[in-house]
Amino acid sequence: MTGVQVLPLEGIPEVRPGDDLAAMLTDALGRAGGLVEGDVVVVAQKVVSKAEGRVEQADDYVEVILREARSVRRRRDDLIIAETEHGFVCASAGVDRSNTPDDGWVVLLPRDPDASAAAIRERLAERFGQAPAVIVSDSFGRAWRQGTTDVALGVAGMRPLLDLRGTRDGRGYELQTTMIAVADELASAAELVLGKASGVPAALIRGYRVPAGDGSARELVMPPERDLFP
Amino acid sequence: MTGVQVLPLEGIPEVRPGDDLAAMLTDALGRAGGLVEGDVVVVAQKVVSKAEGRVEQADDYVEVILREARSVRRRRDDLIIAETEHGFVCASAGVDRSNTPDDGWVVLLPRDPDASAAAIRERLAERFGQAPAVIVSDSFGRAWRQGTTDVALGVAGMRPLLDLRGTRDGRGYELQTTMIAVADELASAAELVLGKASGVPAALIRGYRVPAGDGSARELVMPPERDLFP
Protein backbone atom coordinates (compact mmCIF):
# COMPACT_ATOMS: atom_id res chain seq x y z
CA MET A 1 0.00 0.00 0.00
CA THR A 2 1.50 3.31 -1.01
CA GLY A 3 1.33 6.24 1.33
CA VAL A 4 3.34 8.83 3.16
CA GLN A 5 5.79 7.98 5.93
CA VAL A 6 6.76 10.45 8.63
CA LEU A 7 9.93 9.44 10.44
CA PRO A 8 11.59 11.11 13.42
CA LEU A 9 15.28 11.91 12.97
CA GLU A 10 16.57 10.77 16.31
CA GLY A 11 19.87 11.15 18.11
CA ILE A 12 20.51 14.78 17.23
CA PRO A 13 22.32 16.35 20.19
CA GLU A 14 21.25 19.65 21.72
CA VAL A 15 22.05 22.40 19.25
CA ARG A 16 24.09 25.39 20.38
CA PRO A 17 25.05 28.65 18.66
CA GLY A 18 27.60 27.98 15.95
CA ASP A 19 26.90 24.26 15.71
CA ASP A 20 26.93 22.69 12.25
CA LEU A 21 23.27 21.71 12.12
CA ALA A 22 23.54 20.40 8.56
CA ALA A 23 26.24 17.96 9.70
CA MET A 24 24.04 16.82 12.57
CA LEU A 25 21.14 16.28 10.16
CA THR A 26 23.45 14.43 7.78
CA ASP A 27 24.48 12.07 10.57
CA ALA A 28 20.88 11.48 11.62
CA LEU A 29 19.78 10.88 8.04
CA GLY A 30 22.71 8.53 7.54
CA ARG A 31 21.55 6.49 10.52
CA ALA A 32 18.05 6.50 9.01
CA GLY A 33 19.39 5.02 5.75
CA GLY A 34 19.96 8.18 3.74
CA LEU A 35 17.74 10.01 1.30
CA VAL A 36 15.77 8.85 -1.69
CA GLU A 37 14.28 10.94 -4.48
CA GLY A 38 11.29 12.98 -3.34
CA ASP A 39 12.16 13.03 0.35
CA VAL A 40 11.20 16.05 2.45
CA VAL A 41 13.26 17.02 5.50
CA VAL A 42 11.45 19.13 8.10
CA VAL A 43 13.59 20.94 10.68
CA ALA A 44 12.23 22.76 13.71
CA GLN A 45 12.90 26.51 13.65
CA LYS A 46 14.24 26.38 17.17
CA VAL A 47 17.34 24.41 16.26
CA VAL A 48 17.87 26.38 13.06
CA SER A 49 17.76 29.62 15.03
CA LYS A 50 20.12 28.28 17.68
CA ALA A 51 22.67 27.06 15.15
CA GLU A 52 22.51 30.46 13.45
CA GLY A 53 23.13 32.25 16.73
CA ARG A 54 19.69 33.82 16.84
CA VAL A 55 19.60 33.66 20.63
CA GLU A 56 20.12 36.50 23.04
CA GLN A 57 19.94 37.39 26.68
CA ALA A 58 16.82 39.39 27.37
CA ASP A 59 15.96 41.19 30.55
CA ASP A 60 12.76 42.43 28.96
CA TYR A 61 10.96 39.80 26.90
CA VAL A 62 8.27 42.21 25.66
CA GLU A 63 10.91 44.65 24.47
CA VAL A 64 12.46 41.95 22.30
CA ILE A 65 9.07 41.02 20.87
CA LEU A 66 8.30 44.63 19.98
CA ARG A 67 11.71 45.02 18.36
CA GLU A 68 11.25 41.86 16.29
CA ALA A 69 7.72 42.89 15.26
CA ARG A 70 6.93 44.89 12.18
CA SER A 71 3.53 45.58 13.70
CA VAL A 72 1.41 44.46 16.63
CA ARG A 73 -1.97 43.15 15.53
CA ARG A 74 -3.56 42.47 18.91
CA ARG A 75 -2.44 42.51 22.50
CA ARG A 76 -4.12 41.10 25.60
CA ASP A 77 -2.14 40.88 28.80
CA ASP A 78 1.09 39.09 27.95
CA LEU A 79 -0.25 37.68 24.68
CA ILE A 80 1.04 39.73 21.75
CA ILE A 81 -0.06 38.80 18.22
CA ALA A 82 2.48 40.44 15.97
CA GLU A 83 3.62 40.52 12.38
CA THR A 84 7.26 39.60 11.98
CA GLU A 85 9.71 41.23 9.58
CA HIS A 86 9.09 38.24 7.27
CA GLY A 87 5.35 38.97 7.24
CA PHE A 88 4.29 36.07 9.44
CA VAL A 89 1.57 36.81 11.98
CA CYS A 90 2.08 34.86 15.19
CA ALA A 91 2.31 35.09 18.96
CA SER A 92 5.27 37.00 20.38
CA ALA A 93 6.64 37.68 16.86
CA GLY A 94 8.10 34.19 17.09
CA VAL A 95 10.30 35.04 20.08
CA ASP A 96 10.46 32.00 22.35
CA ARG A 97 11.53 31.60 25.95
CA SER A 98 11.26 27.80 26.25
CA ASN A 99 14.07 25.47 25.27
CA THR A 100 16.61 28.27 25.47
CA PRO A 101 20.25 27.77 26.49
CA ASP A 102 19.77 29.42 29.89
CA ASP A 103 17.22 31.31 31.93
CA GLY A 104 16.74 34.83 30.64
CA TRP A 105 17.65 33.89 27.07
CA VAL A 106 15.27 33.98 24.14
CA VAL A 107 15.32 32.41 20.68
CA LEU A 108 14.43 34.62 17.70
CA LEU A 109 13.23 33.47 14.29
CA PRO A 110 15.90 32.98 11.61
CA ARG A 111 16.47 36.17 9.62
CA ASP A 112 15.77 34.40 6.32
CA PRO A 113 14.21 30.97 6.87
CA ASP A 114 14.11 30.20 3.13
CA ALA A 115 17.88 30.74 3.03
CA SER A 116 18.27 28.53 6.11
CA ALA A 117 16.32 25.77 4.34
CA ALA A 118 18.31 26.22 1.14
CA ALA A 119 21.65 26.00 2.97
CA ILE A 120 20.61 22.75 4.67
CA ARG A 121 19.34 21.39 1.37
CA GLU A 122 22.61 22.09 -0.37
CA ARG A 123 24.63 20.32 2.30
CA LEU A 124 22.34 17.29 2.29
CA ALA A 125 22.51 17.12 -1.51
CA GLU A 126 26.34 17.15 -1.36
CA ARG A 127 26.37 14.28 1.08
CA PHE A 128 23.63 12.06 -0.32
CA GLY A 129 23.61 12.92 -4.03
CA GLN A 130 19.88 13.67 -3.67
CA ALA A 131 18.52 17.13 -2.95
CA PRO A 132 15.51 16.80 -0.67
CA ALA A 133 12.86 19.45 -0.22
CA VAL A 134 13.57 21.18 3.09
CA ILE A 135 11.07 22.92 5.36
CA VAL A 136 11.89 25.00 8.44
CA SER A 137 8.86 24.68 10.70
CA ASP A 138 7.43 26.42 13.74
CA SER A 139 4.38 26.06 15.97
CA PHE A 140 1.85 28.84 15.40
CA GLY A 141 -1.43 29.54 17.08
CA ARG A 142 -4.38 30.34 14.87
CA ALA A 143 -7.28 32.76 14.87
CA TRP A 144 -10.52 31.10 16.05
CA ARG A 145 -8.98 27.72 16.86
CA GLN A 146 -7.34 26.52 20.03
CA GLY A 147 -3.91 24.99 20.04
CA THR A 148 -0.95 25.31 17.76
CA THR A 149 -0.20 23.54 14.51
CA ASP A 150 3.18 23.51 12.85
CA VAL A 151 3.60 25.62 9.74
CA ALA A 152 6.40 26.34 7.27
CA LEU A 153 8.58 29.40 7.89
CA GLY A 154 11.06 28.53 5.18
CA VAL A 155 11.15 26.15 2.23
CA ALA A 156 13.70 25.05 -0.35
CA GLY A 157 13.36 22.75 -3.31
CA MET A 158 9.58 22.93 -3.50
CA ARG A 159 6.66 25.28 -3.89
CA PRO A 160 4.72 25.70 -0.64
CA LEU A 161 1.30 25.89 -2.29
CA LEU A 162 -0.37 23.27 -4.45
CA ASP A 163 -2.32 25.31 -6.95
CA LEU A 164 -5.41 23.52 -8.18
CA ARG A 165 -6.92 26.52 -9.91
CA GLY A 166 -8.48 25.31 -13.10
CA THR A 167 -8.48 21.69 -11.93
CA ARG A 168 -11.88 20.04 -12.15
CA ASP A 169 -13.50 17.52 -9.90
CA GLY A 170 -14.97 14.18 -10.99
CA ARG A 171 -18.02 15.96 -12.44
CA GLY A 172 -16.06 18.63 -14.25
CA TYR A 173 -16.91 21.34 -11.75
CA GLU A 174 -14.04 23.69 -11.04
CA LEU A 175 -12.64 23.11 -7.54
CA GLN A 176 -13.68 25.72 -5.02
CA THR A 177 -10.70 25.15 -2.76
CA THR A 178 -7.99 26.05 -5.15
CA MET A 179 -4.76 26.45 -3.21
CA ILE A 180 -3.57 23.96 -0.64
CA ALA A 181 -0.80 25.01 1.74
CA VAL A 182 1.01 21.70 1.48
CA ALA A 183 4.19 23.02 3.11
CA ASP A 184 2.15 23.80 6.21
CA GLU A 185 0.49 20.38 6.05
CA LEU A 186 3.91 18.72 5.78
CA ALA A 187 5.12 20.74 8.77
CA SER A 188 2.06 19.62 10.73
CA ALA A 189 2.59 16.00 9.73
CA ALA A 190 6.20 16.25 10.90
CA GLU A 191 5.14 17.70 14.26
CA LEU A 192 3.38 14.41 15.00
CA VAL A 193 6.82 12.81 15.42
CA LEU A 194 8.80 15.79 16.72
CA GLY A 195 7.47 16.12 20.20
CA LYS A 196 8.33 19.34 21.98
CA ALA A 197 9.34 17.60 25.16
CA SER A 198 11.17 14.65 23.60
CA GLY A 199 13.84 16.68 21.89
CA VAL A 200 13.49 15.34 18.34
CA PRO A 201 14.06 18.45 16.19
CA ALA A 202 13.68 17.05 12.66
CA ALA A 203 11.70 14.58 10.61
CA LEU A 204 11.92 12.86 7.26
CA ILE A 205 8.79 12.62 5.12
CA ARG A 206 8.85 10.01 2.38
CA GLY A 207 6.33 9.25 -0.33
CA TYR A 208 4.84 12.69 -0.88
CA ARG A 209 5.27 14.38 -4.23
CA VAL A 210 5.91 18.05 -3.45
CA PRO A 211 4.85 20.76 -5.94
CA ALA A 212 7.97 21.18 -8.07
CA GLY A 213 9.81 24.46 -8.29
CA ASP A 214 11.85 26.92 -6.32
CA GLY A 215 9.37 28.42 -3.93
CA SER A 216 9.50 30.64 -0.87
CA ALA A 217 7.53 30.41 2.34
CA ARG A 218 6.73 34.09 1.79
CA GLU A 219 4.17 32.83 -0.74
CA LEU A 220 2.23 31.55 2.28
CA VAL A 221 1.84 35.06 3.66
CA MET A 222 -1.53 36.59 2.81
CA PRO A 223 -0.90 39.78 0.82
CA PRO A 224 -2.10 42.92 2.66
CA GLU A 225 -4.79 43.63 0.09
CA ARG A 226 -6.35 40.22 0.75
CA ASP A 227 -5.88 40.25 4.53
CA LEU A 228 -9.32 40.55 6.14
CA PHE A 229 -7.91 40.48 9.70
CA PRO A 230 -5.33 43.28 9.88
CA MET B 1 12.65 3.01 12.27
CA THR B 2 9.41 3.90 14.00
CA GLY B 3 7.25 6.67 12.65
CA VAL B 4 3.83 7.58 11.42
CA GLN B 5 2.30 6.15 8.26
CA VAL B 6 -0.41 7.94 6.30
CA LEU B 7 -2.21 5.63 3.93
CA PRO B 8 -4.92 6.50 1.40
CA LEU B 9 -8.07 4.39 1.59
CA GLU B 10 -8.63 3.74 -2.05
CA GLY B 11 -11.47 2.27 -4.03
CA ILE B 12 -14.32 4.02 -2.21
CA PRO B 13 -17.04 4.70 -4.79
CA GLU B 14 -18.70 8.08 -5.15
CA VAL B 15 -20.86 8.66 -2.09
CA ARG B 16 -24.52 9.60 -2.55
CA PRO B 17 -27.20 10.63 -0.07
CA GLY B 18 -28.29 7.65 2.01
CA ASP B 19 -25.20 5.56 1.22
CA ASP B 20 -23.76 3.48 4.03
CA LEU B 21 -20.43 5.28 4.32
CA ALA B 22 -19.29 3.16 7.27
CA ALA B 23 -19.72 0.02 5.16
CA MET B 24 -17.70 1.61 2.36
CA LEU B 25 -14.95 2.51 4.83
CA THR B 26 -15.07 -1.00 6.27
CA ASP B 27 -14.55 -2.46 2.81
CA ALA B 28 -11.67 -0.10 2.08
CA LEU B 29 -10.02 -0.82 5.43
CA GLY B 30 -10.48 -4.53 4.87
CA ARG B 31 -8.62 -4.23 1.58
CA ALA B 32 -5.92 -2.29 3.44
CA GLY B 33 -5.47 -5.15 5.92
CA GLY B 34 -7.83 -4.01 8.71
CA LEU B 35 -7.16 -1.99 11.81
CA VAL B 36 -4.58 -2.31 14.57
CA GLU B 37 -4.61 -0.70 17.98
CA GLY B 38 -3.96 3.02 17.87
CA ASP B 39 -5.07 3.56 14.27
CA VAL B 40 -6.69 6.85 13.28
CA VAL B 41 -9.20 7.00 10.43
CA VAL B 42 -9.65 10.40 8.80
CA VAL B 43 -12.73 10.91 6.63
CA ALA B 44 -13.35 13.95 4.45
CA GLN B 45 -16.37 15.99 5.53
CA LYS B 46 -17.68 16.03 1.99
CA VAL B 47 -18.47 12.33 1.90
CA VAL B 48 -19.81 12.35 5.46
CA SER B 49 -22.18 15.17 4.54
CA LYS B 50 -23.28 13.46 1.35
CA ALA B 51 -23.99 10.16 3.11
CA GLU B 52 -25.99 12.05 5.72
CA GLY B 53 -28.06 13.79 3.07
CA ARG B 54 -26.64 17.22 3.82
CA VAL B 55 -26.93 18.28 0.19
CA GLU B 56 -29.53 20.54 -1.33
CA GLN B 57 -30.43 22.33 -4.48
CA ALA B 58 -29.62 26.00 -4.16
CA ASP B 59 -30.61 28.75 -6.56
CA ASP B 60 -28.94 31.28 -4.30
CA TYR B 61 -25.61 30.14 -2.89
CA VAL B 62 -25.18 33.22 -0.70
CA GLU B 63 -28.61 32.70 0.83
CA VAL B 64 -27.62 29.19 1.90
CA ILE B 65 -24.36 30.46 3.41
CA LEU B 66 -26.16 33.14 5.40
CA ARG B 67 -28.71 30.59 6.63
CA GLU B 68 -25.95 28.18 7.74
CA ALA B 69 -23.99 30.97 9.44
CA ARG B 70 -24.45 31.97 13.04
CA SER B 71 -22.62 35.18 12.22
CA VAL B 72 -20.67 36.74 9.36
CA ARG B 73 -17.18 37.83 10.42
CA ARG B 74 -16.00 39.45 7.20
CA ARG B 75 -17.27 39.79 3.67
CA ARG B 76 -15.47 40.89 0.53
CA ASP B 77 -17.14 40.33 -2.82
CA ASP B 78 -18.14 36.69 -2.92
CA LEU B 79 -15.82 35.69 -0.06
CA ILE B 80 -17.79 35.32 3.17
CA ILE B 81 -15.94 34.41 6.36
CA ALA B 82 -18.63 33.12 8.68
CA GLU B 83 -19.06 31.33 11.96
CA THR B 84 -21.02 28.12 11.62
CA GLU B 85 -23.62 26.85 14.08
CA HIS B 86 -20.86 24.60 15.47
CA GLY B 87 -18.65 27.62 16.17
CA PHE B 88 -16.15 27.02 13.36
CA VAL B 89 -15.00 30.12 11.50
CA CYS B 90 -14.43 29.42 7.82
CA ALA B 91 -15.20 30.52 4.29
CA SER B 92 -18.83 30.21 3.15
CA ALA B 93 -19.84 28.70 6.51
CA GLY B 94 -18.55 25.44 5.09
CA VAL B 95 -21.07 25.37 2.25
CA ASP B 96 -19.40 23.91 -0.82
CA ARG B 97 -20.32 23.95 -4.47
CA SER B 98 -17.56 21.69 -5.83
CA ASN B 99 -17.90 17.92 -5.96
CA THR B 100 -21.67 18.15 -5.64
CA PRO B 101 -24.06 15.65 -7.20
CA ASP B 102 -25.26 18.08 -9.86
CA ASP B 103 -24.97 21.68 -10.91
CA GLY B 104 -26.86 23.96 -8.59
CA TRP B 105 -26.43 21.66 -5.61
CA VAL B 106 -24.44 22.47 -2.52
CA VAL B 107 -23.00 20.36 0.30
CA LEU B 108 -23.49 21.57 3.88
CA LEU B 109 -21.43 20.62 6.92
CA PRO B 110 -22.69 17.68 9.00
CA ARG B 111 -25.06 18.85 11.75
CA ASP B 112 -22.94 17.17 14.44
CA PRO B 113 -19.54 16.11 13.10
CA ASP B 114 -18.50 14.55 16.43
CA ALA B 115 -21.57 12.33 16.24
CA SER B 116 -20.72 11.49 12.63
CA ALA B 117 -17.23 10.43 13.72
CA ALA B 118 -18.60 8.44 16.66
CA ALA B 119 -21.07 6.57 14.45
CA ILE B 120 -18.31 5.59 12.01
CA ARG B 121 -16.08 4.58 14.90
CA GLU B 122 -18.72 2.30 16.35
CA ARG B 123 -19.29 0.53 13.06
CA LEU B 124 -15.56 0.05 12.46
CA ALA B 125 -15.11 -1.30 15.99
CA GLU B 126 -17.91 -3.83 15.38
CA ARG B 127 -16.27 -5.07 12.23
CA PHE B 128 -12.61 -5.11 13.24
CA GLY B 129 -12.74 -5.61 17.02
CA GLN B 130 -10.59 -2.46 17.34
CA ALA B 131 -12.05 0.99 17.83
CA PRO B 132 -9.93 3.51 15.94
CA ALA B 133 -9.89 7.21 16.61
CA VAL B 134 -11.97 8.87 13.89
CA ILE B 135 -11.62 12.40 12.55
CA VAL B 136 -14.00 14.14 10.15
CA SER B 137 -11.85 16.66 8.27
CA ASP B 138 -12.38 19.69 6.07
CA SER B 139 -10.19 22.18 4.22
CA PHE B 140 -10.21 25.61 5.88
CA GLY B 141 -8.51 28.80 4.89
CA ARG B 142 -6.63 30.72 7.57
CA ALA B 143 -6.21 34.29 8.63
CA TRP B 144 -2.89 35.74 7.40
CA ARG B 145 -1.80 32.66 5.46
CA GLN B 146 -2.54 31.68 1.90
CA GLY B 147 -3.96 28.32 1.03
CA THR B 148 -6.04 25.84 2.94
CA THR B 149 -5.00 23.18 5.41
CA ASP B 150 -7.22 20.37 6.57
CA VAL B 151 -8.58 20.58 10.09
CA ALA B 152 -10.80 18.43 12.30
CA LEU B 153 -14.53 19.18 12.36
CA GLY B 154 -15.41 16.12 14.38
CA VAL B 155 -13.50 13.59 16.46
CA ALA B 156 -14.29 10.36 18.27
CA GLY B 157 -12.13 8.18 20.47
CA MET B 158 -9.49 10.81 21.15
CA ARG B 159 -8.94 14.26 22.56
CA PRO B 160 -8.20 16.82 19.83
CA LEU B 161 -5.66 18.80 21.86
CA LEU B 162 -2.41 17.54 23.33
CA ASP B 163 -2.10 19.50 26.53
CA LEU B 164 1.52 20.06 27.54
CA ARG B 165 0.77 22.59 30.28
CA GLY B 166 3.11 21.88 33.10
CA THR B 167 5.45 19.82 30.91
CA ARG B 168 9.06 20.96 31.06
CA ASP B 169 11.68 21.03 28.36
CA GLY B 170 15.14 19.49 28.60
CA ARG B 171 16.30 22.33 30.84
CA GLY B 172 13.30 22.26 33.12
CA TYR B 173 11.76 25.39 31.63
CA GLU B 174 7.99 25.20 31.31
CA LEU B 175 6.94 24.87 27.68
CA GLN B 176 5.61 28.07 26.17
CA THR B 177 3.57 26.33 23.51
CA THR B 178 1.28 24.40 25.74
CA MET B 179 -1.54 23.04 23.61
CA ILE B 180 -1.02 21.30 20.30
CA ALA B 181 -4.02 20.83 18.02
CA VAL B 182 -3.05 17.30 17.08
CA ALA B 183 -6.45 16.50 15.54
CA ASP B 184 -5.87 19.32 13.07
CA GLU B 185 -2.33 18.10 12.41
CA LEU B 186 -3.63 14.58 11.79
CA ALA B 187 -6.24 16.00 9.40
CA SER B 188 -3.50 17.91 7.57
CA ALA B 189 -1.31 14.82 7.39
CA ALA B 190 -4.23 12.89 5.92
CA GLU B 191 -4.85 15.56 3.30
CA LEU B 192 -1.43 14.76 1.84
CA VAL B 193 -2.87 11.48 0.55
CA LEU B 194 -6.48 12.52 -0.05
CA GLY B 195 -6.18 14.68 -3.09
CA LYS B 196 -9.19 16.74 -3.93
CA ALA B 197 -9.12 15.84 -7.59
CA SER B 198 -8.23 12.16 -7.19
CA GLY B 199 -11.34 11.19 -5.29
CA VAL B 200 -9.76 9.48 -2.27
CA PRO B 201 -12.04 10.54 0.61
CA ALA B 202 -10.39 8.84 3.58
CA ALA B 203 -7.02 7.92 5.05
CA LEU B 204 -5.61 5.63 7.69
CA ILE B 205 -2.93 6.98 10.03
CA ARG B 206 -0.87 4.37 11.86
CA GLY B 207 1.80 4.79 14.50
CA TYR B 208 0.60 7.95 16.21
CA ARG B 209 -0.47 7.80 19.84
CA VAL B 210 -3.51 10.06 20.10
CA PRO B 211 -4.31 11.87 23.38
CA ALA B 212 -6.58 9.39 25.15
CA GLY B 213 -10.11 10.28 26.11
CA ASP B 214 -13.50 11.11 24.70
CA GLY B 215 -13.03 14.51 23.17
CA SER B 216 -15.00 16.82 20.92
CA ALA B 217 -13.82 18.95 18.04
CA ARG B 218 -15.68 21.79 19.75
CA GLU B 219 -12.66 21.96 22.08
CA LEU B 220 -10.75 23.29 19.07
CA VAL B 221 -13.03 26.32 18.84
CA MET B 222 -11.54 29.40 20.50
CA PRO B 223 -13.93 30.52 23.24
CA PRO B 224 -15.42 33.98 22.58
CA GLU B 225 -13.65 35.54 25.55
CA ARG B 226 -10.28 34.52 24.09
CA ASP B 227 -11.08 35.32 20.46
CA LEU B 228 -9.00 38.34 19.44
CA PHE B 229 -10.39 38.38 15.87
CA PRO B 230 -14.18 38.53 16.22
Image: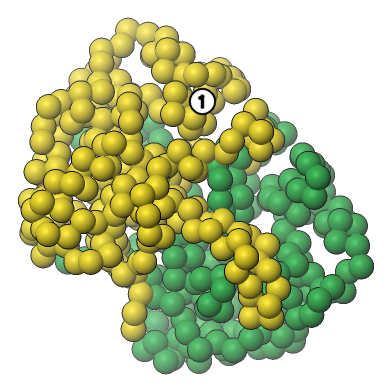
Chain colours: A yellow, B green
Chain identifier of the residue bearing label 1 in the image: A
Vertical comparison of A17 with B125: above or below: above
| Residue at 20% in and 23% down | A53
Say whether residue A32 is left or right of residue B89.
left
Residue A100 vertical position relative to residue A183 in the rendered view, above or below:
above
Using the rendered image of the protein, determine whether residue B219 is visible from the camera's viewpoint. no
> Horizontal placement of A143 versus A86: left or right?
right
Q: Residue B129 at what x, y percent from top left?
A: 43, 86
- Where in the figure is residue B40, as x and y percent of width and height? 44, 70
- The residue carrying mark 1 is A83
Please tell me which residue is depicted at 69% across the width and 35% down the height of the picture: A228
Seen at 29% across and 61% down, the residue is A205
The answer to which quarter of the image holds residue A226 is top right
- Judged from the image, the secondary structure of the residue bearing numbered disc 1 is strand
Q: Is residue B105 left or right of residue B219?
A: right
- Vertical arrangement, residue B139 with respect to residue B6, above or below: above
Residue A140 falls left or right of residue B109 = left
Can residue B203 be seen in this snapshot? yes
Q: Considering the image in quadrants, where does the C terminus of chain A appear?
A: top right
Q: How many marks?
A: 1
Of residue A113 and residue B88, the one placed in the foreground of this image is: A113
**Nearer to me, A188 or A214:** A214
Q: Residues within 10 Å of mark 1 (few under 14, many from 20)?
A: many
From the top left corner, tell me how far across and down residue B172 is, in percent.
24, 30
* Residue type, mark 1 in image: Glu
Q: Nearer the viewer, residue A50 or A192?
A: A50
Looking at the image, residue B52 lies above or below residue A126: below
- Tell me where residue B109 appears, x and y as whole percent: 72, 65
